[in-house]
Amino acid sequence: MVRPDAAPAEGGDDVWFEVLSAVDRTCADLVDYQERLERQNHELEDLRSFLASILFSVSDALIVISRSGEVLETSASVATLTGQPRGTWHGKALAGMFESGSIEAIDRALGEAANSRSPVTLEVALKGPVGPAPLELSISPRLDDRKRVVGYVLTGRPLGELRQAYSALAASHEALKSTQAQLVRNEKLASLGRLLAGVAHELNNPISFVYANAHALERYAGKFEAYFEKLQAGADRDELIALREALKLDREIRNLRTAIEGARDGAERVRDIVEDLRRLSAEGSGEMVEFDLVDVARIAAHWVQRGSKAGAEVMFTGLPSLAVRGRQGHIQQVVMNLVQNAIDAVSEQGEAGRIEITADTEDGRACLAVSDNGPGISEEVAQAVFDPFFTTKAVGSGTGLGLAISNKIVEEHGGRLRLCPRGGALGGACFSFDLELVEGAE
């Protein structure tokens, strides 16, 4: 029997202290675990809410299935496409959602996605409320941590929307091409408008020459008719000789030949002018052809110079000819724009203005440079000189499209229009571009 006042067994308090400490630690661990569990539950609820909002708001059809093909989740858009509530398909086979003609293709795509571990795209049709609902469907495999396929995610966009988008894109592209072509034509018309004075003067000379010779021929015809009328009336030889001397037919016969040659020369000159204008205004949208770049540059510079009142001198240096391949009408427009800009730059210098057009080859390509002795181009202006509608000219004096369109034309020919980095040979501005040389031309 143990007495009440007996001392406790040795080590008894330590044992109870350890037990109580273990109980406290366990309670603390339980409380901490409970807090973490609640946090995770909140995070899980937030995640579920986030996923639900995505499934509700996504516009494309979204279907999540298991590896066996059982539907696990669908987006709200699937209900719209099929006419069935979202929960209708959950737990059912994927094949039940699609038209019979699409099931075999889906099975093949599922196998291909599983083997390649990458998305597979195909066209299928859902069972819609009033008939098939065609989709462009993308099937992507779902992988676990060990890279094993545990299911698939199917996303699809209604083909009707895609076709409408493609149609709108195609219409916009056609409108853009039409606008670009219209800008090219407008700039060409603007260039031609600046040259009307020169064209009128150029045509006026040969036409006036032909007109004057036509009057002379009419006068000669009257004299010959009078002579032949006397001849047919049976006039004697002396009378005919006297009439011939009075009408000066011997001299008129010599003048007749001169008048015919002059009329022919004037007509040929008009023909050449019309041919130049035809080439100048050519659409140039056909096949690439071979032509002489220097000859085209001479014609373009001639027309610009004829239409200008600046009186600037235009010089050609370098190679006498360069056989290139391109659209002749468009390249002529590029040269006209460059020469017109150069003439505008030296317009205040009058006859002291000088423009130099240099033809050369570089790295197996033809190069043409147009430089002037004008004020040049500042670094600030050089940054925007090829931008559409950018111009340093006064309002109404330029469209701001000349260099932009010229740059586009040269790029279409596989070349590049550049602002010479060190200025021109004459100390002012200089622009150059390159074209494809005809084989053997260099």
Image: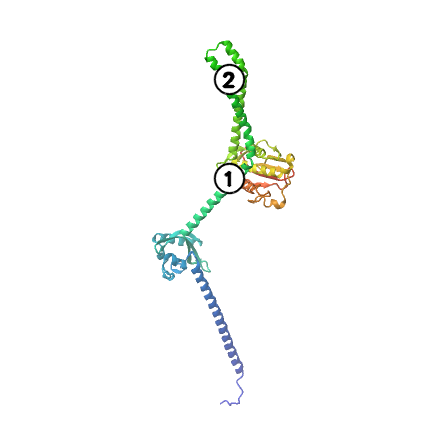
| Location of residue 62 with respect to 9 vertically, above or below | above
Say whether residue 66 is left or right of residue 192. left
Work out which quarter of the rendered image holds the C terminus and state it.
top right
**Image spot of residue 20 (x, y percent):** 51, 79
Amino acid identity at mark 1: Arg
How many other residues sit within 10 Å of disc 1, few (<14), some (14-19) or many (≥20)?
Answer: some
- The residue at the point 47 percent across, 45 percent down is 175
Q: Pick the residue in front: 401 or 21.
A: 401
Amino acid identity at mark 2: Lys
| Location of residue 350 with respect to 20 vertically, above or below | above
| Location of residue 127 with respect to 259 vertically, above or below | below
Q: Which residue is mark 1?
A: 185
**Image spot of residue 418 (x, y percent):** 58, 41
Residue 189 visible in this rendered orientation of the protein: yes
Q: Pick the residue in front: 131 or 427.
A: 427
Q: CA distance from mark 2 to mark 1?
A: 52 Å
Say whether residue 234 is left or right of residue 430. left
Say what secondary structure mark 2 lies in: helix
Residue 142 badge:
none
- The residue at the point 50 percent across, 43 percent down is 180
- The residue at the point 47 percent across, 15 percent down is 229
Say whether residue 23 is left or right of residue 88. right
Q: Which residue is mark 2?
A: 223
Q: Pick the residue in front: 291 or 436.
A: 291
Q: Pick the residue in front: 280 or 417.
A: 280
| Label whose residue precedes the other's in the sequence (2 or 1) | 1
How many other residues sit within 10 Å of disc 2, few (<14), some (14-19) or many (≥20)?
Answer: some
